[in-house]
Amino acid sequence: MSVPSDADPAIAPFKLVETRPGSHSLLLTTFDPADEVFERYELEGGGYAWEAVARHVVENDASELDDRVGFDPEASMFCAYGEDREALYQLGTRLAALFHDPTRLAAIIESIGPDGFDD
C-alpha cells in the first residue's frame, strides 16, 4: 500500500491511496478532534462510526457514489475502497468537510440515531 507523502488538503485528514494498480482506498486513522462529537452521543468515533456517517452521506447526499464505493472499517481505521478513484475522492471531500465542522457532524449523528452505529 503506498501512502502519499503529503496529504491532499481537500480531504485531510483522510488519505487516498492506491493499494494495488487500479484499486484505491480512502483511509482515516486519526479521529481527534472529531471523536469528541461522537463522545457527546456516547459513541466511539472510530472506523465503524465513520462508516455509518459515510453510508448516511452516500444514501442521502451522494447517491451517485452508491455502487462506486465499498466499506471495510475497523475500530482503529475507517476504510472505503474501490476502483473508482474519483468517487472515493468525492466521498473524501464530503467526509473531510464533516470532520472539520462539529455542528454538521453532530446533525448527521443525530439523523442516523443511536441504532445506526456499530461499536
Image (tube, rainbow, N blue to C red):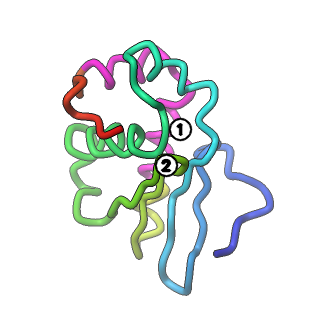
In the picture as drawn, the residue positioned furthest to the right comes out as: 5
Q: Residue at x 22, y 23 (%)?
A: 113
Q: Residue at x 21, y 38 (%)?
A: 60
Query: Viewer-proximal residue, 66 or 53?
Result: 53
Secondary structure under badge 2? helix
Seen in the picture, residue 110 relative to 55 is either above or below; the reply is above
Query: Viewer-proximal residue, 91 or 52?
Result: 52
Residue 88 falls inside the magenta stretch? no
Q: Quadrant of residue 80?
A: bottom left
x and y percentages locating residue 28 in the rendered image = 56, 48
Residue 105 falls inside the magenta stretch? yes
Residue type at mark 1: give it.
Ala
Secondary structure under badge 1? helix
Seen in the picture, residue 55 relative to 31 is either above or below; the reply is below
Residue type at mark 2: give it.
Gly
The quarter of the image holding the N terminus is: bottom right
Query: Viewer-proximal residue, 62 or 108?
Result: 108
- Identify residue for label 1: 96
Circles 1 and 2: CB distance less than 8 Å?
yes
- Identify residue for label 2: 92
Q: Which residues are magenta?
A: 90-110
